[in-house]
Amino acid sequence: MTADSTAVLAHLRGMSGEMVDLLSRLVDIESPSGEPPRQVPVRAVLVDELEPLGYAVELVDAPEYGDHLVARPTGPAEDRPSQLLIGHMDTVWPLGTAVDRPATVDGANLTGPGSFDMKAGLVQMLYALRSLRDLGLEPPADPVVFVNTDEEIGSPHSRRHLELLAAGASRAFVLEGSYGAAGSLKVGRKGVGRYVIRAFGTAAHAGLEPGEGASAVLEISHQIQKLFELNDVERGVTVNVGTVDGGMRPNVIAAEASAHIDVRVFTAEDGERVDAAIRALESVNDDVRLEVEGNFDRPPMERNPANEDLWRQASSIGEELGLDLDAAVVGGASDGNLTSQFVPTLDGLGAVGGGAHRVDEHVAIESMPERAALVALLLMAPLGGGI
């Protein structure tokens, strides 16, 4: 049976109230990164929703973060291609935030910590799958669901599992929030590098024998200027020294100092260039030793032809749904940065709203059925970029 966009959208609009109720439940179940017990109730809700849809759920053991979830359709799967649906259940908000700011329907929006990033995306994914079941629609590739518990801290544990799934998939859809008020989809993201530069000098009394010391703080100040010179606005290269530490007391020449650096680039080429420049930094003062550590923990999700083809597919489907879907390239990273190294990836398929990581985090309620319908119809779209 082929997908009828009108029927899919009407079906999902009829479940709009259920979607809001489920999102409210998930927002009020707090699940901060690095709190394994707090991931359990969210994961239980996801399992309760997926199993009636005919999905077999597996847990990937991750004691430090909370187990990740993988769900696949039951039944014969030999020689069946797969397509990924990717999300995360962890949030940036500390325990107690939802007590002070619980999920609230405020006019056209639902507000609450973790609503936009990205529990609404999880709800929309679940209802997209539910619409396929209810309407008897069979996608050309099995939708495989992967929801991790460590995305907000860089996916240190789940990365290898996600990459293995991506390497065997036909395409990947990431349910992170869309971009901007118009809800643009994301075809590119900057890669993210994190570095620490440490300087080791010699302590001395700042008043009695200042000449006997070699200031690590002064050396770090020189290096910070070199780092900021690596910024290139036209190419989208940003190098930011976010925190600086050093010294012991005002009257002591600082023996140690450090700077923590965030680097973002649109292309792997720029990433290699900036990485080499940071590693090549040399002390201005020969009496101070430098150490550099760090790397790019998420490569760029480059705006490549494969990702563009998925966006064109989505754009065509969007027209059927009355949506005007632009393509965006953004500075923040997601697990789409990882999957796009292996498989065509389209990101930003989650909520329309805003305020990620802010107190005004919110989701546009009216858009939820539309975006769930978009995901459902993308799952039904021909493999290989056809419409």
Image (cartoon, helix red, strand yellow):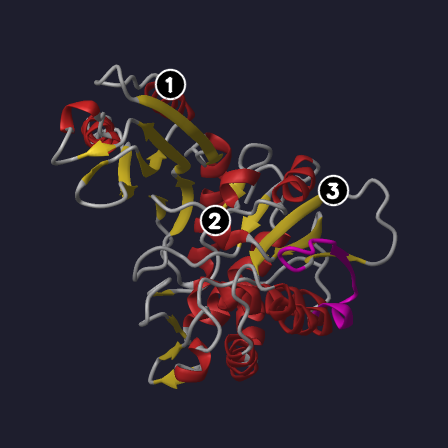
Crowd band around label 3 with a 10 angstrom C-alpha radius: few (<14), some (14–19), many (20+): some
On screen, residue 336 versus residue 47, left or right, reads left
Residue that carries the numbered disc 2 in the rendered image: 347
Q: Helix, strand or loop at disc 1?
A: helix
Q: Is residue 173 above or below residue 133?
A: above
Residue sitting at x 74%, y 54%? 61
Residue 70 picture location, percent across and down: 71, 55
Magenta residues span 50-66
Residue 382 is a magenta residue: no
On screen, residue 257 versus residue 333, left or right, reads left
Q: Which mark is residue 81?
A: 3
Crowd band around label 2 with a 10 angstrom C-alpha radius: few (<14), some (14–19), many (20+): many
Q: Nearer the viewer, residue 185 or 235?
A: 235
Q: Nearer the viewer, residue 201 or 321?
A: 201
Residue that carries the numbered disc 1 in the rendered image: 276
Q: Amino acid at mark 1?
A: Ala
Q: Which mark is residue 297?
A: none
Q: CA distance from mark 2 to mark 1?
A: 29 Å
Q: CA distance from mark 2 to mark 3?
A: 20 Å
Residue 84 picture location, percent across and down: 64, 48
Q: Amino acid at mark 2?
A: Asp
Q: Amino acid at mark 3?
A: Pro
Mark 1 and mark 3 lie on one chain; the one further toward the N terminus is: 3
Residue 345 picture location, percent across and down: 53, 42
Residue sitting at x 31%, y 58%? 180
Mark 2 and mark 1 lie on one chain; the one further toward the N terminus is: 1
Q: CA distance from mark 1 to mark 3?
A: 40 Å
